[in-house]
Structure formats: C-alpha cells, structure tokens
C-alpha cells in the first residue's frame, strides 16, 4: 500500500468527512502549555452519527503525541446512563495499532485507546472523552492529533478505501492542535480524588513556607484555568497553571529558589471565578 499522510504535521486543521456510520469531532479542548514531566489533559467532544440498536460498540480514541509521552488515565462519558468509562490501553481493537492506518511523523506516535465497555449508539448522541497523558522530557512545540470512531470495523473500511483513493470512512480526525512543552521547574501538580461542586482556591499550606508549599484548587466544570503568583509590587513572578483543566480537585506544589523572602499573592481565574490569597516565604 502506498504511504498515507506522510506529511501529516504540515497540514493545517485537517478534518476528514464522515461518509456513514461514524462520528464527528465537534470540539477539542487541550492544554496549550505544559511542563516537561507534567500532565497533558485533552477533552474530545464527539457527535455520534450512528444509530446502532443491536450490537454495542466500544468508543475508539487515538491521539498523536511525541514519542516519550504515555497514557495515565481517562474517562468516557455518554448521556445514556452509562457513566464514566476508563480508557484502556491494554485493550486492542480488531484493526491493531493506528500506526497501520496513518503513519505517524518522525518523533511522534499514536496512543490507541478504547472505552472498557461497549454501548448502543443513537443518532445525534454527543459524548465526551477526557484523557490525561504523562508528558516526557522533550521540550518544544508539537502538533497533537486526534482520531475517533464508534466502530473499529470502520478503520478496516478505511484501509480498503485507501486502495481506491477514497476518503476516510466511518471516522473523523482533527490535527495540528499545538502544545508547547516548557522546561521543568519547581512546580508539580497532582490530581486528587473527588468531584467538586464549586470553584475554589484554598489557602496554601504550610504558610509561611520554606522552601515549598502546596496550593489546592477545585474545578467544578472543565474550563481554562490560570493560576499565577505576584509580588507586593504586582509583578507576576510565576505561572503555576495556564490551560484547560477538566472537573476535579488539584494540588500544586510550588517551590522557587530564586524568590526572596517576603509576602506574595497568588490568584486564580477560571470560568468567571477569581480569587486571590496571600502567602509568606521565609528563608
């Protein structure tokens, strides 16, 4: 077979049309900036075009990422009462790895995921998958790509269609969602258990602190979050969070060896909610 999409990263915002029995990617929300060694989060919203009433299918998500990234966990939500479903890299679809369908560019790879439970589909059903990935040590700008389908056999049809130069059947892709991986700093973030009912910024602990402190915050509904630190003069001295975060509770461990002793303020902004708190560094 001839090479497929070998120039994938050079194309802009590619979205292949669904010909039948598939799904459309309607929205991608992902981290825009992430530290080396940090966690990258993406939420993929998909509109189902398949009305399948007899044979449950698993949801298929494939994400094009740098080679040193890895899968942490994820959820797969539908409005049909199924609830969250864990995306499982140990489950293999009948068509094998996505690399056999769309060859990844040099330095990139596909992370191939399935929902752990199949479900019956309804036309115009909208579902949402949120995936957390471990970022590697390589820094720079990277084009993240996404492929979705509700039926693994559609990928086999795609292979056949390629022989006849036809479009991608039964699946949809959205490419070149850029992310910048910055060098690691003294900032480490952890996602905690529980589902919050409100947006919140907690007081750091310990306070005063030396050399590090922990700041907890809660995201009631997935949104862009910016958490920054300012000195007494109002100068921004650190950016702790800057990007999309799904619903959840988070803990930031902050340590900056270059800051001098004194009073600092940290401020969070998310979905119209803002709050500022004071912390004291004593060296």
Image: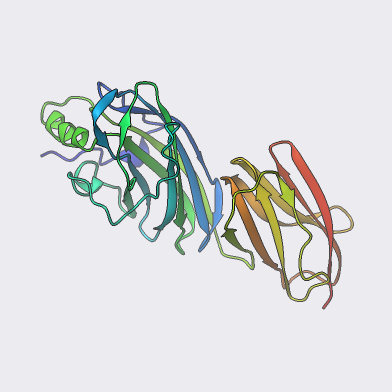
State which quadrant residue 183 falls in: bottom right
**Residue 132, how many percent across, how many down?**
47, 52
The vertical placement of 154 against 236, above or below, is above
Q: Nearer the viewer, residue 81 or 122?
A: 81
Q: Which residue: 10% across, 39% down?
A: 1
Q: Which residue: 29% across, 27% down?
A: 22
**Residue 128, how many percent across, how many down?**
45, 36
**Residue 83, how many percent across, how many down?**
45, 41
Q: Nearer the viewer, residue 44 or 167?
A: 44
Task: Give the quadrant of the C terminus.
Answer: bottom right
Q: Nearer the viewer, residue 153 or 134?
A: 153
Q: Is 261 left or right of 106, judged from the image as shown?
A: right
Q: Which residue: 80% across, 47% down?
A: 275
The vertical placement of 254 against 2, above or below, is below
Q: What count of labels does the image hold?
A: 0
State which quadrant residue 94 falls in: top left
Q: Which residue: 33% across, 48% down?
A: 116
Q: Is 171 left or right of 31, judged from the image as shown?
A: left
Q: Is 178 left or right of 159, judged from the image as shown?
A: right
**Residue 246, how many percent across, how many down?**
56, 45
Q: Is 36 left or right of 24, judged from the image as shown?
A: right
């Amino acid at each position: 077979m001839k090479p497929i999409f070998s120039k994938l990263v050079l194309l802009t915002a590619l979205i292949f049309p669904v010909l039948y029995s598939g799904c459309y990617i309607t929205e991608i929300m992902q981290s825009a900036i992430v530290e080396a060694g940090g966690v990258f989060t993406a939420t993929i919203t998909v509109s189902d075009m398949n009305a399948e009433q007899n044979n449950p299918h698993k949801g298929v998500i494939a994400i094009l990422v740098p080679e040193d990234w890895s899968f942490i966990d994820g959820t797969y939500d539908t409005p049909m009462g199924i609830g969250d479903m864990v995306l499982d890299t140990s489950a293999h679809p009948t068509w094998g790895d996505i690399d056999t369908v769309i060859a990844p560019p040099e330095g990139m790879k596909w992370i191939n995921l399935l929902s752990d439970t199949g479900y019956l589909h309804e036309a115009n059903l909208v579902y949402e998958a949120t995936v957390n990935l471990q970022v590697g040590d390589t820094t720079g700008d990277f084009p993240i790509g996404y492929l979705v389908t509700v039926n693994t056999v559609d990928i086999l049809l795609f292979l056949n269609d390629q022989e006849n130069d036809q479009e991608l059947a039964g699946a949809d892709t959205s490419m070149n969602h850029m992310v910048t991986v910055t060098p690691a700093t003294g900032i480490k973030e952890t996602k905690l258990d529980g589902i919050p009912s409100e947006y919140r910024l907690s007081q750091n602990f310990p306070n005063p602190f030396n050399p590090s402190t922990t700041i907890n915050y809660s995201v009631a509904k997935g949104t862009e979050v910016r958490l920054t630190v300012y000195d007494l003069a109002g100068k921004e001295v650190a950016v702790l969070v800057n990007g999309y975060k799904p619903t959840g509770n988070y803990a930031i461990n902050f340590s900056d060896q270059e800051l001098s002793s004194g009073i600092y303020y940290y401020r969070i902004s998310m979905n119209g909610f803002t709050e500022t708190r004071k912390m004291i560094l004593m060296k």
